[in-house]
Image: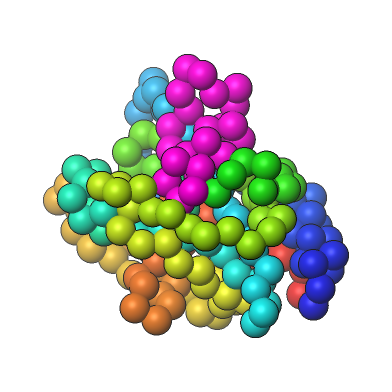
């Protein structure tokens, strides 16, 4: 599959209507307050073309971080005052976190938002990396930058539902492990949402 075919498949996925997702999709008993205020964030779902096929760039967060230490995540973060929108935030954070220049990303579009348990409305920004780059993990925030095959995370059969205790309740979530990497929670849910849209 060449770059043009991969790009067309991703664009078709973006054109497929789908509702927004949340960390509570598998937990219908959770009642969310109607007056809750969500903070906007953007994450970059970056697809790169490698010799063995398309791959998605992910990070392993620093174990020293206060929030979500050691978890697998997309590059990204909250929308700052200087950001025009979640796309700008995702590109800025990707440059800061992994050294990916914004001009090296062809933004294809955005997926529906994803609400997290930490009260963020996360906008996944789908893009393709234009040329090879050398990842530079941001010290203190990112322990590792790695990639997973797009085919792996686009295969719904590789996802499973697991659970753990959170705030005294059993919380269910998607996982899609890859090698030593335990991809779960919002990252897995966003990837599964994309997988559900991808053409056969």
Against 50, residue 193 (above or below) is above
Task: Pick whichever, 57 or 37, lies toward us.
Answer: 57
Residue 193 visible: no
Q: Is residue 85 magenta?
A: yes
In front: 54, or 103?
103
How far from the left and from the top, in percent, is residue 195?
Answer: 63, 65
At x 43%, y 77%, the residue is 178
Snapshot colouring: rainbow
Residue 101 percent location from the top left of the image: 59, 44
Q: Is residue 179 left or right of residue 50?
A: left
The quadrant in which the N terminus is found is bottom right
Question: Which residue is depicted at the point 81% across and 73% down?
Answer: 2
Residue 41 picture location, percent across and down? 48, 34
Apparent side of residue 72 relative to residue 22 in the rendered image (left or right): left
Q: Which stretch appears magenta?
A: 77-99
The mark tally for this picture is 0
Depth check, front residue: 124 or 115: 124
Split into 4 quadrants, where in the image is the C terminus?
Answer: bottom right
Is residue 35 magenta-colored?
A: no
């Amino acid at each position: 599959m060449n770059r043009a075919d991969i790009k067309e498949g991703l664009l078709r996925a973006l054109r497929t209507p789908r509702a927004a997702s949340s960390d509570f999709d598998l937990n219908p008993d959770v009642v969310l307050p109607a007056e809750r205020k969500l903070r906007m964030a953007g994450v970059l779902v970056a697809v790169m073309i490698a010799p063995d096929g398309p791959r998605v760039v992910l990070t392993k967060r620093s174990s020293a971080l206060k929030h979500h230490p050691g978890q697998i995540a997309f590059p990204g973060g909250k929308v700052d005052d200087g950001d025009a929108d979640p796309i700008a935030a995702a590109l800025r954070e990707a440059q800061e976190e992994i050294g990916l220049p914004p001009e090296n990303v062809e933004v294809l579009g955005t997926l529906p938002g994803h609400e997290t348990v930490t009260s963020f409305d996360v906008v996944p920004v789908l893009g393709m990396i234009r040329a090879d780059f050398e990842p530079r993990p941001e010290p203190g925030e990112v322990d590792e930058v790695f990639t997973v095959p797009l085919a792996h995370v686009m295969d719904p059969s590789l996802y499973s539902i697991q659970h753990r205790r959170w705030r005294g309740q059993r919380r269910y979530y998607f996982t899609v492990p890859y090698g030593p990497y335990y991809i779960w929670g919002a990252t897995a849910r966003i990837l599964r949402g994309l997988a559900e849209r991808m053409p056969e």
